[in-house]
Image (tube, helix red, strand yellow):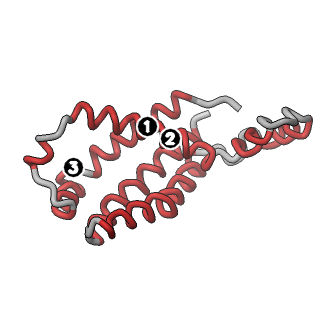
């Protein structure tokens, strides 16, 4: 099973594109700034080149990590990496199921589930200890639910 690095890169870039839209003041940017206790001065005080480069690197790592969640064949592929190697049963499995569930819709579904069941609890827990409110949790978790849905769609559907 080959990794589609163009799909991974496109998924990583999509996180920045969705963030550009999501955190725009006309969408959720103003609500996020209020909930995060963020000001224009704080935003302008950051090294934006470093922030965006690191965000892209993190998004690339995230795209790599959700690949097995949205492409079910990766589970079968991981089994052939052990002592037994590639058995005829693996070849038969891949012949039958090579492109099953490899759609944008299926990837988006699993990406959204990852957002709800992984990103939301992590961000929610951090926000509780940081004494942030529900608006903060909803804005940031909403971004990750949408972003992981888009990333999952790209990774699963582009083959």
When asked about the image quadrant of residue 135, the answer is: bottom left
- The residue depicted at 84 percent of the width and 42 percent of the height is 93
Which of the image's four quarters has the C terminus? top right
Element under label 1?
helix
- Tell me: residue 96, above or below residue 33: above
Residue farthest to the left, as pictured:
41
* Cα distance in 3D space between marks 2 and 1: 6 Å
In the image shown, does 69 or 112 lie closer to the viewer?
A: 69
When asked about the image quadrant of residue 36, the answer is: bottom left
Which circle, 3 or 2, is nearer the viewer?
2
Q: Residues within 10 Å of mark 3 (few under 14, many from 20)?
A: some
| Residues tagged 2 and 1 counted as in contact (Cβ below 8 A) | yes
**Residue at label 2?**
63
Residue farthest to the right, as pictured:
88
Q: Position of residue 52 (x, y in %)?
A: 29, 35
In the image shown, does 126 or 31 lie closer to the viewer?
A: 126
Q: Position of residue 143 (x, y in %)?
A: 36, 55
**Residue at label 3?**
24
- The residue depicted at 73 percent of the width and 40 percent of the height is 78
């Amino acid at each position: 099973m080959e990794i589609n690095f163009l799909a991974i890169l496109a998924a990583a870039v999509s996180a920045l594109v969705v963030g550009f839209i999501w955190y725009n003041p006309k969408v959720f940017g103003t609500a996020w700034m209020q909930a995060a206790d963020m000001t224009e001065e704080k935003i302008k005080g950051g090294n934006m080149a470093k922030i965006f480069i690191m965000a892209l690197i993190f998004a690339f790592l995230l795209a790599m990590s959700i690949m097995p969640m949205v492409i079910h064949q990766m589970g079968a592929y991981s089994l052939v990496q052990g002592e037994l190697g590639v058995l005829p049963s693996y070849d038969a499995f891949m012949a039958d199921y090579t492109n099953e569930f490899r759609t944008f819709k299926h990837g988006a579904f699993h990406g959204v589930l990852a957002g709800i069941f992984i990103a939301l609890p992590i961000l929610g827990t951090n926000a509780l200890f940081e004494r942030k409110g529900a608006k903060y949790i909803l804005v940031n978790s909403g971004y990750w639910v949408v972003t992981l849905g888009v990333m999952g769609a790209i990774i699963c559907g582009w083959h």
